[in-house]
Amino acid sequence: MLGLNSRDFKLFIIVCIMALAAPILLNPFPTASAMGESFNAGYPALMQRFVIFGILVIGFNILFGLTGYLSFGHAAFLGVGSYAAVWMFKLLSYNVVPAIILSVIVAGLFSVVIGYVSLRRSGIYFSILTLAFAQMSYQLAYSVFTPLTNGETGLQVYNDDPQILMGENSPTVPHFFGLEMNAQSVVDVAGWSFTFQNGYYLSAVFLILAFYLSIRIFRSPMGLMLRAIKSNQTRMSYTGINTKPYMLAAFVISGMYAGLAGGLLAAMDPLTGAERMFWTASGEIVVMAILGGVGTLIGPVLGAGIIKYLENIVSKINDGILHNWFAFMPDWLDNALVTIIHPFIGKGWHLTLGLLFMAVVIFLPGGLVQGGQKLGGLFRRKKTDDAADGAKTPAE
Amino acid sequence: MGILEVKGINKRFGGLQALGDVNLSVAENTVHAIIGPNGAGKSTLLNVLVGKLIPDSGSVMFDGQSVLGRAPHEINQMGISRVFQTPEIFSDLTVFENVMIPCFAKRDGAFQMNAIGAVTGHGDIKDMAEAILADVNMLDKRQMTASSMSRGDKRRLEMAMCLVQEPRLLLLDEPTAGMARADTNNTIDLLKEIKEKRDITMAIIEHDMHVVFSLAERITVLAQGMPLVEETPENIKGHPKVREAYLGEAQV
Amino acid sequence: MDAFILQILNGLDKGSAYALIALGLTLIFGTLGVVNFAHGALFMIGAFCAVTVQKLLGLSFDVIDPTQTDFLGNPLKVAIPYVEAWFGPAIGGAIQDWSVPLAILVVIPVMFLVGWAMERGLIKHFYNRPHADQILVTFGLAIVIGEIIKAFFGANPIQTPAPEVFIGTVDVGAWLGMDPGSVAYPTWRMVYFFFSAIIIAAVFAFLQFTTFGMVVRAGMADRETVGLLGIDIDKRFTLMFGLAAAVAGMAGVMYTPILSPHYNIGMDFLVLSFVVVVVGGMGSLPGAVLAGFLLGILQSFASMNEVKALIPGIDQIIIYLVAIIILLTRPRGLMGRKGVMED
Amino acid sequence: MSKSNFSRRGVLKTGAIAGAGLAVPTYLRADGHAGFTNAPQGSTVKIGFNVPQTGPYAEEGLDELRAQELAVEHLNGMGDGGMMNTFSEKNLKGNGILGKKVEFVTGDTQTKSDVARASAQSMIQKDECIMINGGSSSGVAIAVQGLCQEAGVIFMAGLTHSNDTTGKDKKANGFRHFFNGYMSGAALGPVLEKEYGNERQAYHLTADYTWGWTQQESIAASTEALGWNTVQDVRTPVGAGDFSSYIAPILNSGADTLILNHYGGDMVNSLTQAIQFGLRDKQVNGKDFTIIVPLYSELMAAGAGSNIQGVFGSMNWNWQLQDEGTKAFVKSFGEKYGFPPSGAAHTCYVQTLLYADAVERAGTFNPCGVVEALEDFDFDGMGNGPTSYRGADHQCFKDVLVMKGTEAPTNQFDTLEIVEVTPRAQVEYAPDHPMFAGGDLGECNPGA
């Protein structure tokens, strides 16, 4: 179906459903309940980040997952993509289409240059080259290139910008041919309320496309070549295959994914700053990929979701909320629990994050996807003969 | 005029003369062995032939074209394949995927952007891969991960990967190194079979004289980076110079 | 000319900091084959050893002084450190004043212990795992260590001054036969530089001249063979981890008067020290030291107004630019060996 | 599909029908109901405290958070009421805001614009906050201010000192109580003249980003007006850590004054290192070398320890002031937390009360009503003397403190002393002053 084999097609359908029904799935608790106030993640800004970072990490995974080349400067492409998009808003109009197109192109060009140079080396030398390029981009964007990037303040649209395509009645927020990104409908069902936002759905459509494309690449001859490069570069060149263009193609595709993510971030929220390119941002991408499961199809989306969830949800839990949860308990127990949990929430969310990395890397070297497979394995033990058929298809 | 003509190759590493004025001519459709004691420069010569090393002087012509200065993949595309001492295969991939890659290289050349259509959609590649696997009796192992196979099977797989490209010259770098006698004999049989079935030239670097004398039609002896003798196997046996070079090295 | 000499001194000083951290990082990488992203955290733990010693020496009891009031108008509680109460204000004050050098004595055993615990408890299980896993798990550890430090000491930098006698400058210009006062350099920075030089020399001497060092060097070159000789290389490598941790810790302690420590200081140094290690060549100890000093000096020169006027912003990117140039011209860094960390 | 921008969920509770897993969706336009984003429903109103809880300014952020929690307590009638008792307006009765109990949510900005905006978006979209308060950097303040403008909620900026916040990046929905670079320069000028005369050679080290530049510009302008000469302005990378290579050239540059346009950890390090280089022991041009740190904070002072002794700088407010408002605030803060509040804490506390009062006076939570109530609003009793929020740029005008590092501290909080309270008239400027020009306040946006 759609050029996918049945397993991939199932996975694709699952992702489609997850993406399209996210506003419902991510709000499992009634809005006004204590759990809902703390743990519901189905609000547009966060859902946008889930899918946009999902796109970013899917792209990163095409490079790292398939070829094993660890780029430690991928955030730079996200950053230039965002800058390109905001410049489109400033110069043309708030229509997101030219913005997204340009962001992909600019990130693509940027990655051609960085990739061409960095791919002359492999292993950690490649990683450090990409890191060095990204850090230079960050430092310059923050200071010397301020006329282009607006430095620390971040590039944003001002009322006196040219916006030459802007008509009398054009929306003053990013829009898709008039469909405003931040417009939304709210549906209330009993105690639940679900928000369906245009911007989210635009991003979700891109995620679905990006995911689909990534399956096709994984299953294509090029995907095979890239996995072969990861496996044995020597044999590759003695098989008459020029690995450089394949690597560069993977690098550029991956950079364009990052550019798309950057463009979408700007389309959702038309402001971008240099810190989007800082090395910790690149590190975060790596962490997302490894957390989810490198080289798997669905892993990147999971990894991105979990990190963003921690960053946005756990960091907002404070002691007051904790006391609220445990209000039904006796005071001493309530206080004891709050004392125990306190270091891990709110300002301590980094601690939770650090411990989570360690736990996943130690116990689930294949990332969360591997964890899922292990769990699935427990349930499916009886159907072993069934699995023999598909088990050889790597990279689920 | 042989298919491979090596003329006056010199290569120094620092103060060490690895190859000194090496001349070699490999005739088409023959099996040519290059032997010599350790440190004679056999591997260096091989690395020059495949483009991994660039000699300080001299020329290497393959079928009338120079191979010097070309990247390994270009030399391969000219029709030279190489088998390594330890089989170089794609260990993380399945056997079938392993042979599909040279099939693609054969059909599409050094680079072809095929990023959208599924691998399984390329029927001709599939047929090619299946044919070669049938050839080397590995069809039943097609779904195995390459790394989980026995060493002998890995060798066979590597050979299949080389053969599917239909090279005109196959370079073999100690193809039986570290193998048990039975495996060695299997490999000899495999090579003989290959030689019978197709028009192919082979150049073998080998320590094991049993292998050399079972296969080779011509033998070049290298010593201290210089070609000592080039002769038929019959004449090599008992050649005084060879004896001298190998004194204490191996039983000739 | 004097500006030039000053920048060379700055470069040496910066370089010695980079070199010390990179040395420890390379020691761990070379011996254990582990890419340790928590190495910056070890540096930070060292720095906070100094803070802890300072705080411990400053432990005090309160005496209520009714003649003074605090900011809320209540009688002022005057804190009197125990050391001053026990040894009198003069000696007690001096002990407190010397808290940073004293911390060196504390940091060595502490860091050995930390290094040992880290190696046995975590790193050991990652020898055969991909480098990416090693990076991630140690990165996670670095975050956890940072957060724990933050929970105890807060996020604000903590002032840890050098002893009184080291405050002020030395007249380097006079040594070099220039006009007195033309090149004055902070005393503590000179101390730091010589301290680093001694540590670096000691590490090299240790590896060069002791049997232990010889075995470790052999192990760095070819771990399997040394293992075959029936030498328990693992135990020695554990000790090396402790040693690397101690080197990082000492670097951290001595750096505190120059840079007030805060919980994120390790991360600040991490990326830089990795660039240094890679530019030096993975696994090469002399390379790490050389690259440390090279980048330190280049960075100092790039910060000069004359250079900045020529190329704006060069001081912000010089390290990375140099790293790119070196890696493109010398594929394995300045002194790297072939095949190390290339796949 | 009907659409609404940032619509209000609470109002939509009407026709919800729960079916067997599938409901008949009921779309309603929110505009017709409340008319503005996140109009409070029921008996509570929620505000968002968006402060750095991790990263370099975490301590400052946590202090802001303490002050904000205190403000909420006071608004809800708990505690001793703090500055509500000294505030010149008497609309706040301790019964919340407009009778609604005040609740708050907290978020972590990490001092990164992206993260701060994400956190603010979550407060607006998920928690339905009506106002966002706090922050500890100008970049973040400007980013969040822009977001609040688009979303239609009020932003009360915390610590932000860049001229741009109420200059070229000013927004109708945003208000700044804190002072700015220009005011620092204007306040420091006369004191510096008195202390150091008219013939000084000043060398600037400036953090290489917008805040640093605007402060440097402001200070250079005001010192040059005194007759000082700016020898050199050197831009330093943020978070450089080791500033030695920037400090060394000062020694022989002929400068006799070093102005450090740094903040936070950068300032602690650059000041400490400058002193280690013996700058303060030097005599240049027959004068004692001197160092000035235009923007001070208590946390920086604590971090720099004895190095700041005698160093001049400026502050928005300090707990040592002796007016009734300050005393009341310091008392309730000190009793609750055991140490005096920082300037950042004061600003966030005051901003919360000012917002609450503006809502009371406007009689509505509608941002446009609040904007109207705050514009050109004069008040007193909040620690800064008579103060007014200027309508033209939403900048507060009040006295500015010139501070000096205490020469002989008597306790751990005694780090800075007030040298002079520069009267407000001296630091005022026209809204179209060149350093602030180029912005556009725009229209207030009520959102939905």
Image: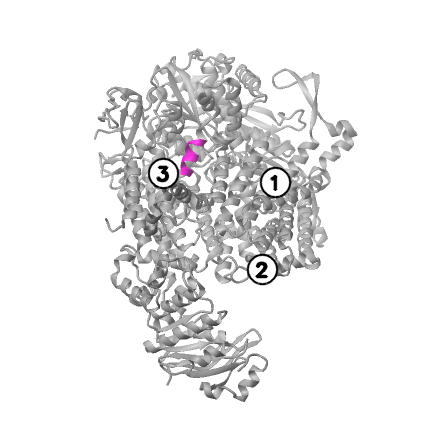
Q: x, y percentage for residue B228? A: 51, 85
Is label 2 or label 1 in front?
A: 2
Is label 3 or label 2 in front?
A: 2
> Is there one chain holding both mark 3 and mark 2?
no
Q: x, y percentage for residue D412? A: 64, 26
CA distance separating discs 3 and 1: 35 Å
First in sequence: mark 2 vs mark 1:
1
Circle 1 residues within 10 Å: few <14, some 14–19, many ≥20: many
* Chain ID of residue with mark 1: C
Residue A307 among magenta residues: yes
Helix, strand or loop at label 2? It is helix
Q: x, y percentage for residue D213? A: 48, 39
Q: Quadrant of the N terminus of chain B?
A: bottom left
> Is there one chain holding both mark 2 and mark 1?
yes
Q: Judge whether residue D138 can be spotted in this image.
A: yes
Determine which residue is flagged by label 1.
C45
At 46% across and 79% down in the image, what residue appears? B212
Helix, strand or loop at label 3? It is helix
Q: Amino acid at mark 2?
A: Glu
At 39% across and 77% down in the image, what residue appears? B202
Q: Nearer the viewer, residue C335 or D407?
A: C335
Q: Nearer the viewer, residue C219 or A201?
A: C219
What is the quadrant of residue C109 in the picture?
top right
Determine which residue is flagged by label 2.
C224
Left or right: D165 in relation to C95: left
**Marks 3 and 1 close (CB-CB < 8 Å):** no
Q: Amino acid at mark 1?
A: Ile
**What is the magenta range?**
A306-314
Q: x, y percentage for residue A288? A: 42, 43
Determine which residue is flagged by label 3.
A50
Q: Amino acid at mark 3?
A: Phe
